[in-house]
Image: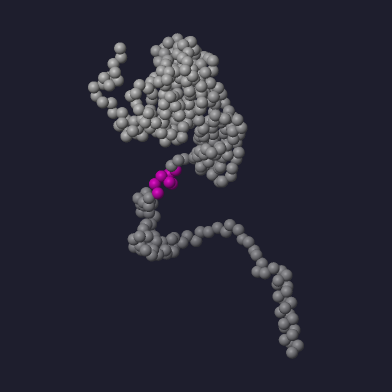
């Protein structure tokens, strides 16, 4: 016989502190096979729903209670959960599979391949909550196509629903196991908005004078990107979709500077050339590195703040080219004529007209 709820603990559980006062401080809220037993009043479940809408993260791993009237779906959280249980629990063994959409989603793409396990060889699970996906994206299913992992964005936050409590079988290595740790890590990090797991991403890098562009999208058809070179010219590139779901393109980055790439609403910037060239490594006014040259040539340096009106002098000969408040420029008389261009003072017709006017003026004067 189960003891009453009020006798389960001698220490009062800090419900109000966790689910009202400090709720916004949590990065992720997880319900693991939770069933409503009166521990959390509806007002606190409503707080969690509002926490998700305002940018929080929620993960619900469903157990058999999800198919009963004690399901979280029959609480205020049902408004943010992406799948609705049908009231049945399937106890037939099945192998979890990645859906067609899941093959493109960063949370489930190439899942387990680093372990040498593809979704066709994962160990079987033995319990699943029959549900209907009302919102969001179905990334994993059973062999019948029923939703197993559903994720969705709600307001500013995110929510994920795992419709089975047998993921632990993978961790135990049953029938070869499966990528249990990798799957849960990716789901949790996606819920907490890790940039590397975003569905729509655009990256640009420069390697060996090649600009490499990578675009991830759940709608990879007819993807393109526009690249703005450092000189302001633009070039349109078509992206090719590869087996890993990434669309890629490349072009020659033959000029140093920033290459700005845009695709849809996304923008990425890549730098070609050295990040910290010597001439920009230290921009402070320091003459210490020129002391040896100035000493050998009889030169010097002046700071404008110490010498408001420095004087420049031409010096034909001598050993000193600087004084207390003046700097000397040596007159070497070395020059080279690069080009000579002749240009008329006035156009020929203008000169002819001027000559005729002068002749007429002279004739008129002599005639008087």
Above or below for 267 versus 82: below
Task: Identify the residue at horizontal 53%, vertical 14% (top origin).
Answer: 143
Residue 173, quarter of the rendered image? top left
The image shows residue 323 at horizontal and vertical percentages of 35, 62
The image shows residue 284 at horizontal and vertical percentages of 37, 50
Q: Is residue 313 visible?
A: yes
Quadrant into which the N terminus falls? top left
Which of these two is toward me, 131 or 183? 131
Q: Is residue 282 magenta?
A: yes
Give the magenta range.
Answer: 277-283
Is residue 91 found left or right of 29 in the rendered image?
A: right
The image shows residue 52 at horizontal and vertical percentages of 42, 32
Task: Identify the residue at horizontal 48%, vertical 29% (top origin).
Answer: 152
Which of these two is toward me, 209 or 132? 132
Asked which colour scheme the image uses, the reply is one colour
Which of these two is toward me, 33 or 346? 33
Task: Identify the residue at horizontal 51%, vertical 27% (top origin).
Answer: 135
Q: For the view shown, which residue lies furthest in the bottom direction?
A: 368
Quadrant into which the C terminus falls? bottom right
The image shows residue 221 at horizontal and vertical percentages of 60, 30
Task: Identify the residue at horizontal 47%, vertical 15% (top origin).
Answer: 88
Q: Is residue 118 visible?
A: no
Q: Is residue 249 magenta?
A: no
Q: For the view shown, which residue lies furthest in the left direction?
A: 10
Which of these two is toward me, 6 or 368? 6
- Tell me how many marks there are: 0
């Amino acid at each position: 016989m189960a003891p009453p709820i009020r006798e389960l603990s001698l220490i009062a559980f800090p419900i109000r502190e966790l689910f009202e006062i400090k709720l916004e401080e949590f990065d992720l809220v997880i319900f693991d096979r939770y069933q409503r037993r009166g521990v959390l009043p509806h007002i606190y479940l409503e707080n969690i729903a509002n926490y998700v809408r305002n940018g929080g993260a929620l993960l619900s791993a469903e157990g058999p209670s999800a198919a009963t009237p004690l399901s979280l779906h029959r609480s205020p959280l049902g408004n943010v959960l992406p799948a609705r249980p049908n009231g049945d629990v399937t106890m037939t063994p099945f192998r979890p599979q990645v859906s067609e959409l899941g093959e493109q989603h960063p949370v489930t793409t190439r899942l387990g391949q680093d372990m040498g396990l593809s979704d066709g060889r994962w160990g079987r699970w033995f319990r699943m909550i029959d549900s209907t996906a009302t919102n969001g994206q179905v990334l994993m299913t059973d062999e019948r196509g029923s939703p197993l992992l559903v994720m969705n964005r709600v307001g500013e936050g995110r929510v994920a629903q795992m419709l089975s409590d047998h993921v632990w079988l993978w961790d135990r290595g049953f029938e070869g196991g499966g990528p249990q740790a990798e799957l849960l890590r990716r789901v949790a990090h996606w819920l907490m908005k890790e940039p590397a797991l975003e569905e729509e991403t655009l990256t640009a890098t420069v390697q060996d004078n090649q600009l490499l562009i990578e675009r991830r999208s759940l709608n990879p058809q007819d993807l393109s990107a526009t690249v703005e070179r450092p000189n302001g010219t633009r070039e349109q590139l078509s992206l090719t979709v590869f087996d890993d779901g990434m669309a890629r393109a490349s072009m020659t980055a033959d000029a140093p500077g920033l290459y700005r790439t845009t695709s849809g609403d996304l923008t990425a910037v890549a730098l070609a050339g050295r990040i910290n060239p010597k001439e920009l490594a230290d921009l402070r006014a320091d003459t210490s590195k020129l002391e040896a040259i100035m000493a050998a040539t009889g030169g010097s340096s002046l700071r404008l703040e110490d010498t408001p009106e420095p004087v420049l002098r031409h010096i034909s000969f001598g050993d000193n080219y600087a004084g207390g408040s003046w700097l000397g420029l040596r007159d070497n008389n070395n020059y080279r004529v690069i080009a000579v261009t002749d240009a008329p003072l006035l156009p020929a017709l203008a000169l002819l007209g001027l000559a005729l006017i002068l002749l007429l003026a002279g004739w008129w004067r002599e005639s008087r």
